[in-house]
Amino acid sequence: MRRLTLASLAALAALAALPGCGGGSSSPGEQGVTARVDTDPFRLTVLRDGEPVVSQAMGGRLRYRLESGEEHRLTRASSSADGIYRVETDEPGRTAEVRVSETPVGIRLSMRLEPETGVAQVYDAWETGPEEHFLGGGEQGEAVDLRGEILAGKVSWVCTHAPVPYVASSAGWALRVDTLNVYALAFPGSSGGTGCLFSERPSCEFPGLADRAEVCVRGARLDLDLYAGSFEETLRDYHARAGAPAVPPPGQFELIKWRDENQSSDELLEDVDRLRAAGIPVGWIILDNPWEPCIGEMTFDPRRIPDPEGLIRQLSERDVRLMLWVSPKLKCPSGYPPEAILGADQDQQTLDLRIPTVMAEFRRRLRNVVELGVAGFKGDRADEVDLEDLAPDYHNTYPILFARAVMDEAPEGAAVILRAAAMGSQSILPGIWAGDQPGDWVGLHRAIRMGQTAAMSGYPTWGSDVGGYSSEQLTPEVFARWAQLGAVSPVMEVGGIGPHATPWVLGEEAMEALRRAAILHYELYPYFRSVIDRGEPVLRPLGYAYPDDPQAWESDLQFLVGPDLLAAPVTGGGTTPSVYLPAGEWVDLHSGGAVEGGEIFVRSTPLDDLPLYLRAGAVIPFNARTADPWWELDELDRADRAGYLATDGAQLDLAGQPEGVQILVPAPVRPGAVTLDGREVDWTWSPGPMPGAVVRLEGPDVRGELRLSAP
């Protein structure tokens, strides 16, 4: 039970009025998440069931920096009433109002400096331990565990496309900075400074940190939500306060194909035909930039696409829909007033979406292409112009305005992926994409980390370009391994600059790897949906599920897919990578054999194989394409059939199933028999790429222990 109580805050008032006297708002026996406030010096401690979880760090808590560079801090509370404290500072003439209150899921701390004039930024700091690890912070490519990092909280194509001011600790606490102002986060082990900078503007700056984590917000106000619990619990609390992730339509999970530049409609049709001929499913074709005569016009260039409606019709005949690249950038101001344009550099101009008439015209242009038959959007470049001067929160609000415009005009069932996002975007967007990584091993490493950090920050529906973006020197090996990341990512997107725009030029092995990866992606669709429908992250760091396992934190290029699958993509040259499995029994889906976890081992991994493991005893939705498949090449699902993947010995409890139920039971060799609840059932053998017994049963209820007998 996570009952939140601050009932004893009132008892603090008398204590707080006395110089040198501390106070507390919770009693040792109180249950749930509570707060204790000491008044001299002013300091907050969060407790769970009466036990301290985290406290403000005395060395850095509640301080502020003036525009002159001078730094000051809050000192003692001079009075309090109903959780509102008047707190003195060490700067003459300035005080602070601090409110400590309960929320449905945690504790709220709000600070207002009075007066606010001359204050550049405010800070808070929290004590940490030497073995503490941190997740969240938005989409990040350099680290999954944020220990030792400084994160800039400013939407930027230079630093991070999707920063999020939410951080969770392995010590059982988390915080959300409730702001769209520019902010920054710093973690123990960081060496100090500002971290990545998007512009030359003075930014939040931190000292070197040994034993505390800090937050900084531009402006004179600070609002924090504090949570207590496991990573799973605090992420759920964050969703409750900041907004739950949007649930994507089914089509969002279909394979998306694109080229950085198309010269004609024929190239889009060729891509579909080439993929289908190779046995690769595809649901979307992106017409990327440039498709307009000039960026911002949002009309089709007649030299490239003379008949857009005809193209859309031809794609539809192939059961493929057109996705269109769009952005708020502007090179042709026709139709917009002069005040609509932000940015002095002609190549870096963007629309001022705060202006109602500008937003209305932008949306009208989106609506026009939808009326032609465009069925989805890929949104780009809402993170390239510095807008902080216009208003304290406009820079990080801008991608949200862009997202709302795109989603409001997108047709029902549209697939939409945007590059730029901020806190709040997660409730609007059905998906985000990772932007531009180089097409090499370093780029693949970044993409793997970005997928995990995005999921830990409220973005479960994520994907990256298979092979990276700028990839003229891309090798077939890197492409094949990246395709395997795409297989287990909710968004699978193939294309860019280089050979992966036309992957058939990479050779038969690379195309076979892509085929297997794409089919696996479609097989995983019902599992992706089940996880996202529950509001849970899909790509999960090993530390999320195994916070007390040091090796889990070291293995940040491996990850869980939902609660029961573990993926260990090959991230370097060769076919004998090292793999780490946490403690417990796992089933290698490529061989069908059981593997005991708890150690690092070397695994032989051909180019078309992704090391993928299922937790022993697990039963997950999975539409396996067997020798006699129940699903067509491009089908994600069917109303009259359901598929599952279950390990030998798993307990089935499947109610409300459709007419037909298929279950694939991985096994290294053909079994002698298959039993369900002690009774033999009919089965067939599937030799691979996932070897196992295939059982087909009738719904609506399938229950009992599933067992394979020895040959």
Image (spheres, rainbow, N blue to C red):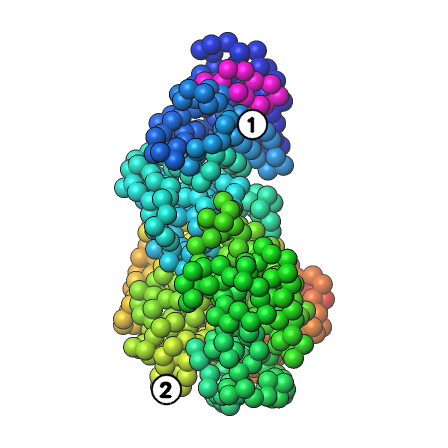
Residue extent of the magenta highlight: 75-86
The answer to whether residue 153 shows anywhere in this view is yes
In the picture, residue 130 is in which quadrant?
top left
Pick out the residue farthest to the top: 18
In percent of width and height, residue 58 lies at: 38, 25
**Which SS does the magenta portion mostly show?**
strand
Describe residue 101's horizontal placement relative to residue 462 as left or right. right
The answer to whether 222 is drawn above or below residue 388 in the figure is above
Judge by depth and name the residue closer to the eye, 647 or 554: 554
Q: Residue at the location (50% across, 9% down)?
A: 18
Residue 606 falls within the magenta-colored stretch: no
Describe residue 465's horizontal placement relative to residue 426 as left or right. left
Residue beneath disc 2: 505
Type of amino acid at the residue the image marks with label 1: Arg
Type of amino acid at the residue the image marks with label 2: Val
Q: Residue at the location (46% across, 86% down)?
A: 263
In the picture, residue 637 is in which quadrant?
bottom right
Residue beneath disc 1: 99
The answer to whether residue 415 shows anywhere in this view is no
**Is label 2 in a helix, a strand or a loop?**
helix
Q: Disc 2, disc 1: CB below 8 Å?
A: no
In percent of width and height, residue 666 lies at: 49, 69
Judge by depth and name the residue closer to the eye, 548 or 322: 322
Give the CA distance from mark 2 to mark 1.
62 Å
In percent of width and height, residue 700 lies at: 72, 66
Which numbered tag is attached to residue 607?
A: none
Residue 76 falls within the magenta-colored stretch: yes
Q: Earlier in the sequence, mark 2 or mark 1?
A: 1
Q: Residue at the location (50% across, 68% down)?
A: 330
Q: Residue at the location (53% across, 83% down)?
A: 301
In percent of width and height, residue 329 lies at: 49, 66
Q: Few, some or many C-alpha atoms within 10 Å of disc 2 (few <14, some 14-19, many ≥20)? A: few
